[in-house]
Amino acid sequence: MAPEDSALRAVPADAVDRITAQWHQERPDLDTEPMAVFGRIYRLSRAMGERVEQTYARFGIGRGEFDVLAALRRSGEPFSLSPTSLAESLMLTTGGMTGRLDKLQKAGLVARCPDPNDRRALKACLTDKGRAVVDEAVAAGLEVQSEALGHLPAADRSVLADHLRALLSALE
């Protein structure tokens, strides 16, 4: 047995184990393996979401604001996108995007700039302050995520990412 295997076997039962055991007791005809997998994915998502939210809060932003700043930062120079492009990439309504942009503009993290290709349109542009905030926030968020993943051997992280990619691809 590899050391990693014994480490995983040493992990105590969790709430999901207790829930699936209760279902097995009451309904032994059911296969609760999907519940064990997706229950843990859901709980991981909630736990990490809360940790990352707390991390972003140190920079005066929430997850929604981070997502907008990150989309602008990832777009490359000149770090600007149309509000419609941002809304589509973040799966938001244009009204929801307007609210986020208003908040970010008020904080000095984005500006509304003329679109060089359409004099009638405006783009959301990352300010220098916004770039500094998102650069620090993404690094801090990744640090929190890396710390959590540190509980798994490196090879297992890669395998987990591959399995999750395949599952997500099948569902999308």
Image (cartoon, rainbow, N blue to C red):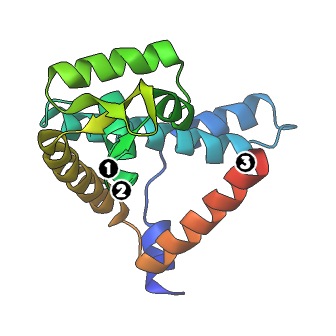
Quadrant housing residue 36: top right
Q: Secondary structure at mark 1?
A: helix
Which callout, 3 or 1, points to the residue nearer the camera? 1
Give how far apart the Cα atoms at labels 3 and 1 are: 40 Å
Residue beneath the point at 72% across and 48% down: 33
- The label shown at residue 73 is 1
Mark in front: 1 vs 2: 2
- Please say if 164 is above or below 123: below
Q: Nearer the viewer, residue 75 or 1?
A: 75
Tag 1: amino acid: Arg
Vertical arrangement, residue 45 with respect to residue 98, above or below: below
The residue singled out by tag 2 in the image is 76
Residue picked out by circle 3:
33
Quadrant where the N terminus sits is bottom right
Foreground residue among 109 and 153: 109
Q: Residue 71: which quarter of the image?
A: top left
Q: CA distance from mark 1 to mark 2?
A: 6 Å
